[in-house]
Amino acid sequence: MADFSDYIVYADESGSATLDGADPHFPVFVLAMTLVRKDDYANVVVPSLQKLKFDFVGHDQLILHERDIRRQKGAFAFLQVDPIQRAAFMKAVDDLVSAAPIEVFAAVIHKDQLTAKYSKPWSPYELALYFLMERLLPLLEWKGQIGKRLHVVFECRGKKEDAELELAFRRIAANQANWGWKNPDFTKIQWEPLFVDKKCNSSGLQLADLFARPIGLHRLKPTQTNHAYEVLAPKINGQKWFP
């Protein structure tokens, strides 16, 4: 049997990873990763999210999506009907995040600054991925995970996009994409990417989906009220802003 890690990572993004035509209202690419011990995930995170769904919609097929919740669209149109229910739902989500035994890491790539500083800039996604794996590596080593297989779960974005991301991921994991002076040895961990459809109803991916945009907005407008970030902030173990 493979020596699997005691932990699993779920990743999600906000903003486009392309460098052309940056959105002036959100000119960044954000990649957020959620690290959770598997025992905690199975015994705490998943049951808590399932209960929230049963409490508010009566079934567990609801898929949390930050954009739809924020806009109260699609499966979350019910939030428009009753302000009391809407407040109760948002509090339940806040409580879920606050109580979840997770650690969150994020990289925010400012695309306009990247293209202004570098004539041939790296892909924002690959940069963000490198920064987060670099941050996770010493923490996983400290947690006794050296030599173990760690799955990093991504939401499918398309066949071409997933293939490009997997190539970048495996290049980093094999120490073939070292930038800067640190040169960390990523081969200490058996990094394994896993691409799944959003419809698989993964609790971990749904939590990760809630985090990326609030972190990006906080970096862009740190003085602006950002309730979602305030709830999340105690869980954040590392952030990287580049360049």
Image (tube, rainbow, N blue to C red):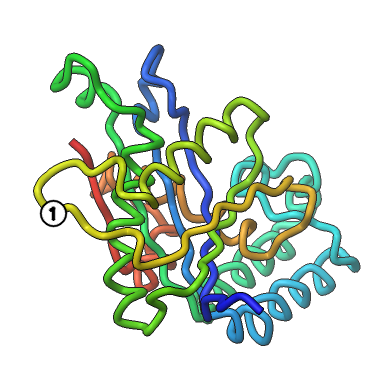
Name the amino acid type tagged 1. Answer: Lys
- Residue appearing at x 26%, y 60% in the figure: 185
Instruction: Report the front residue among 17 and 169.
Output: 169
Image location (x, y in percent) of residue 214: 43, 50
Which quarter of the figure is the C terminus placed in? top left
- Residue appearing at x 81%, y 74% in the figure: 55
Image location (x, y in percent) of residue 7: 51, 75
Q: Secondary structure at mark 1?
A: loop
Image location (x, y in percent) of residue 179: 19, 41
Which quarter of the figure is the N terminus placed in? bottom right
Q: Residue furthest front?
A: 1
Classify mark 1: residues with Cα within 10 Å, few (<14), some (14-19) or many (20+).
few
- Residue appearing at x 57%, y 29% in the figure: 161
**Residue 31 located left or right of residue 142:** right
Q: In the displayed structure, would residue 8 be above or below residue 226? A: below
Location of residue 219 by image quarter: top left
**Residue 11 located left or right of residue 137:** right
Q: In the displayed structure, would residue 51 be above or below residue 212? A: below
Image location (x, y in percent) of residue 141: 32, 76
Q: Residue furthest left?
A: 181
Q: In the displayed structure, would residue 202 be above or below residue 221? A: below
Instruction: Report the front residue among 130 and 103.
Output: 130
Residue that badge 1 annotates:
182
